[in-house]
Structures are given as C-alpha cells and as structure tokens.
Amino acid sequence: MNAIDKNSRTPLYLQLMNILIDMIENKLEEDSQIPSEREICEVYDVSRTTVRQAMDELEKEGYIYKVHGKGTFVSPRRMNQDLIAFYSFTEEMKKLGKEPSSEVTGFEIVQAGDSISNIFKIENEDLLYKISRIRKADGIHMMYETTYIPYGRFKGITREELEEKPLYDVLMKEYNVRISSAEEYFRPILTNKIESVYLDIKEGSPSLKIERFTYEKNSVIEYTVSVARGDKFKYRVKLNNN
C-alpha cells in the first residue's frame, strides 16, 4: 500500500490523489465503487477535509463520479491515444476492449480549393474525396472526423466500403498504400453547434481538435481534421533519452 508522507512538501491531498489515481488505473474496474471517505481516512490516516479535497479534484478531472445515496464510482476509461505510434482508431479501440464502429455522415467529391490544394500540392480545381464520419466505441460518440483523400489516387472507392471497413484497411489492401509517416497537430477547443450534435454533447464542451497529415513517401495521401471529446480522450507522449 502506498503511504502518505506527512513530512513531504507535497500537499497531503495531492499525495492522496496520486494514490487513488494509481488504484483507479491499475486495480479497479470501470463503474466499480471506491472506498468511502471514512474508510480512506482510516487507511491513510488523513482528515476528512483532505479526503474531500482529493475526491473533488478527481471528480473534476473525470476519474470518478458520484451517485447520491450510493457512493463514488470509477468513471469509464478515457481513450488513451499515443501520439507517437501510427494508429488506426478501429485497432486502438479493440486493444482497449471496446467495440469500434463508424457512421459515415458525408461522402462527396469536391474541388480542392486554396487551403486544401496547398496541403496536397495540387491545383485548386483538382478533385478530392471528402468523407465525414462519427467514430464510436461501444456505441458512444467519440470523434467527429472529416477526411480528404485524392480522387485520382483512390478513384472507385465507395461510401458502402467505408461503412463496412476501416479507411486504412481499404487504402492499404485495395489501393496498395504504403504509409511512411504521419504528423499530428492538436489544440483544445470548445465545440460548435454542428460538432456538438455529431458528438452528442453540449455546445461549448471542451474537446481536442486534431489535424492529421498522412504521408506515402513524401506526398500527403490523407488529411483529416478530427474533433475528439475531451471527456473521453487523453493523449500520451512517451519521451526517450536516446
């Protein structure tokens, strides 16, 4: 059992928070009940005020939720997305034990225009597929994505294919794409009305906006703008000292 160090400069409630986070992430299941305030006070020899402060912070950060008259429970896991590894949403959700699915909300052929043509280094009049999807895990709306891919490179792709198969499976297996690298840029946003509808959350909810550039050799073959729910996603960056 981790212990509270009362001689440490770290506030007691922060020490307790770290202990409880370790318990939540490594020992407890989703929706399982955590010990009561009284039990935590006794086990870690801290005051009720310290426990309440730690619990309030854990609730704010989304680790726990309270049910009046019943107790405090572990929140559903946030999806842990690794920024370094190339990923497939479908495969990542499967690894987490979730059932992934996608709903194609838009599928059209559009002209590139100024901003998108610069990304693909093509003419403004050149054509692209524009694909909009809601990405789900266990039926919960997780991300809203708008993807652009070159029409000429992927001519013949259909909406029906993308409703049945992951996009990367189609690109790699049917069009022999060999992805060499990808770049992501992300920033916090508050969702607008349209994004909120697709993500099934309130307008103005904290979220992450992610721009993804996927390369085949030195050419961009996919550009995706995603909005990910802030209450369901967190990102992990692993830094190595080589």
Image (spheres, rainbow, N blue to C red):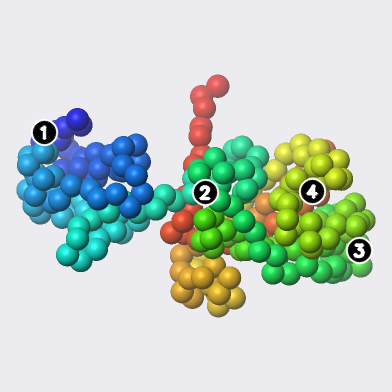
Q: Earlier in the sequence, mark 1 or mark 4?
A: 1
Mark closer to the observer (3, 4): 4
Q: Nearer the viewer, residue 158 or 185?
A: 158
Circle 3 SS class: loop
Left or right of 134 in this view: 71: left
- Callout 1 environment at 10 Å: few (<14), some (14 to 19), or many (20+)? few
Q: Does dot 4 land on a helix, a strand or a loop?
A: helix
Label 4 Cα crowd, 10 Å radius (few <14 / some 14-19 / many 20+): some
Q: Is residue 15 above or below residue 123?
A: above
User: Where residue 127 sits in the image (x, y, percent)?
Assistant: 89, 64
Under mark 1, the amino acid is Asn
- In percent of width and height, residue 97 lies at 50, 44
| 102 over 216 or under it: above or below | below
- Judging depth in this view, the residue of 16 and 37 nearest the camera is 37
Residue pictured at 23% horizontal, 48% vertical: 34
**Left or right: 33 as drawn, with respect to 42:** right
Judging by the rendered image, the residue that carries numbered circle 1 is 7
Secondary structure of residue under mark 2: loop
For label 1, the SS is loop
Q: Amino acid at mark 2?
A: Lys
Front of the two marks 1 and 4 = 4
> Which residue is label 3 attached to?
126
Among the two numbered marks 4 and 2 on one chain, the one whose residue lies closer to the N terminus: 2
Find residue 188 and report its horizontal and vertical position in percent.
Answer: 50, 60
Residue on which disc 2 sits:
98
N-term-proximal mark, 3 vs 2: 2
In this rendered view, identify the residue nearer to me: 41 or 66: 66
Which quadrant would residue 59 be assigned to in this image?
bottom left
Q: CA distance from mark 4 to mark 2?
A: 21 Å
